[in-house]
Image (tube, grey):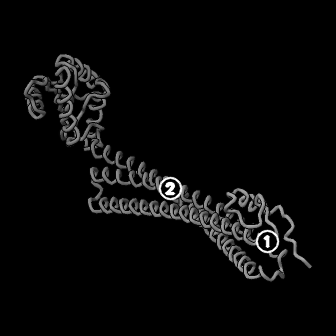
């Protein structure tokens, strides 16, 4: 029986097209326009095999590069997470060591905010790395399918040439390459499956990072609110609602600076609630507390909402009005005294008034207003 070469198989079309595209000097012997005859089929098949193997090798290198990129991105995300964790720990340590100091709390809050932003960025990088791994996995599957296709092509080639003596060594080599191709395809599929598993794990980690970032933002907001409440409590006189002495005097300095930047007008009233000691001694401290609250309520009702009222101590208060004159303040306190005197249990206040002068400090202004108290008796 004489072997006349393999039947033309549609699966060989890509290989034959490649051979046909080569210049005549490079075509294997016995080929015509890339079609192989009995004499040249082994050479053409070998050439096509070499081309396919080179293509698959290039694909492997591309996939390896993509895998390295994904690994680098994952490492970058891990590094960012570590930085965020270190900053959070530093913030917690500082809060613990300082006992909740407001300035230190602000600093640690900023650290937590920056850590939250880093975690969000890391989560995004993890999502991108997961997408890259998925793309690599799909590419590996395609490469594995190509290897299987090439192996099947060689199998069909071998089946048609079985028993041909002179070609046996070459055909054996082709068979070995087909086996290796299948093994590489199986390896590619395993790598692709592993890549998908890691991509899923990355997505889960990214979701956990986003949840943690949301919790950090919520905790940061709660910290800010708690700090604001603590500051408000610390800066407010709990009995009367006026500003506490330290916070109030600091605000008075701001009022002086603001007045000098604008029209320079600022007037203060030094207020003494008359008879507090007598009420405390005669009716008890609860009655004295009520007296102070009544006086401040009347004062607040006749001043603007943003005018400063400070409890200096005991029965003494300071009122500061920007863009006002001593005459305006006298009129306001006259109305306040009239209201307090008309109540069923009348009380009185004494007021000393002073206007801001060019070289005044806050202490100068308060001292001058205090010295004017005898001139404004409500008794």
Whether the residues at callouts 1 and 2 have beta carbons within 8 Å, the answer is no
At a point 7% along the width and 27% down the height, the residue shown is: 359
Residue 344 visible:
no
Q: Position of residue 107 (x, y in %)?
A: 30, 52
Residue extending farthest right: 1
Q: Quadrant of residue 92?
A: bottom left
In front of the other: 295 or 307? 307
Q: Which residue does the numbered mark 1 point to in the structure image?
A: 39
Q: Nearer the viewer, mark 1 or mark 2?
A: 1
Q: Is residue 374 above or below residue 101?
A: above
Numbered label attached to residue 155: none
Q: Quadrant of residue 300?
A: top left
Q: Quadrant of residue 333?
A: top left
Q: Is residue 57 above or below residue 346?
A: below
Q: Local crowd at mark 2 within 10 Å, few (<14), some, or many (≥20)?
A: many
Q: Across the whole image, how many numbered discs are drawn on residues? A: 2
Quadrant into which the N terminus falls: bottom right
At a point 35% along the width and 54% down the height, the residue shown is: 111
Q: Is residue 176 left or right of residue 344?
A: right
Q: Secondary structure at mark 1?
A: loop
Quadrant into which the C terminus falls: top left
Distance (Cα) linking label 1 and label 2:
57 Å
Q: Which residue does the numbered mark 2 point to in the structure image?
A: 125
Q: Secondary structure at mark 2?
A: helix
At a point 50% along the width and 56% down the height, the residue shown is: 125
At a point 13% along the width and 26% down the height, the residue shown is: 352
Q: Position of residue 103 (x, y in %)?
A: 27, 50
Q: Local crowd at mark 1 within 10 Å, few (<14), some, or many (≥20)?
A: some
Q: Position of residue 205 (x, y in %)?
A: 54, 62
Q: Is residue 352 above or below residue 247?
A: above
């Amino acid at each position: 029986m004489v072997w006349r070469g393999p039947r033309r198989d549609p699966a060989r079309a890509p290989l034959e097209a490649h051979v046909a595209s080569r210049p005549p000097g490079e075509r294997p012997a016995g080929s015509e326009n890339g079609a192989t005859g009995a004499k040249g089929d082994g050479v053409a098949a070998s050439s096509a095999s070499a081309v396919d193997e080179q293509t698959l090798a290039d694909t492997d290198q591309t996939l390896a590069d993509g895998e390295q990129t994904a690994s680098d991105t994952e490492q970058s995300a891990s590094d960012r997470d570590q930085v965020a964790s270190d900053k959070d720990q530093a913030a917690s340590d500082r809060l613990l060591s300082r006992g909740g100091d407001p300035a230190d709390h602000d600093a640690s809050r900023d650290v937590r905010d920056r850590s939250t932003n880093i975690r969000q960025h890391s989560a995004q990088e993890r999502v991108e790395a997961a997408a890259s791994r998925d793309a690599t996995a799909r590419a590996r599957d395609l490469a594995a399918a190509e290897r299987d296709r090439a192996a099947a092509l060689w199998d069909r080639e071998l089946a048609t040439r079985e028993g041909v003596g002179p070609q046996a060594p070459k055909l054996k080599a082709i068979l070995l390459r087909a086996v290796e191709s299948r093994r590489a395809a199986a390896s590619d599929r395993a790598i692709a499956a592993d890549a998908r598993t890691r991509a899923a794990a990355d997505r889960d980690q990214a979701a956990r990072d986003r949840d943690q970032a949301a919790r950090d933002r919520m905790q940061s907001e709660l910290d800010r609110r708690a700090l604001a409440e603590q500051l408000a409590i610390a800066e407010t006189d709990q009995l009367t609602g006026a500003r506490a002495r330290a916070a109030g005097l600091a605000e008075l300095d701001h009022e002086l600076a603001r007045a000098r930047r604008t029209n320079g007008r600022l007037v203060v009233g030094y207020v003494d609630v008359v008879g507090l000691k007598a009420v405390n001694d005669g009716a008890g401290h609860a009655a004295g507390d009520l007296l102070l609250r009544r006086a401040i309520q009347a004062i607040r009702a006749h001043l603007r909402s943003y005018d400063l009222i400070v409890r200096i101590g005991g029965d003494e208060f300071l009122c500061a009005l920007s863009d006002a004159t001593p005459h305006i303040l006298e009129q306001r306190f006259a109305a306040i005294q009239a209201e307090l005197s008309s109540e069923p249990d009348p009380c009185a206040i004494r007021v000393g008034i002073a206007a801001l002068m060019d070289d005044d400090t806050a202490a100068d202004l308060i001292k001058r207003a205090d010295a004017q108290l005898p001139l404004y008796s409500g008794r």
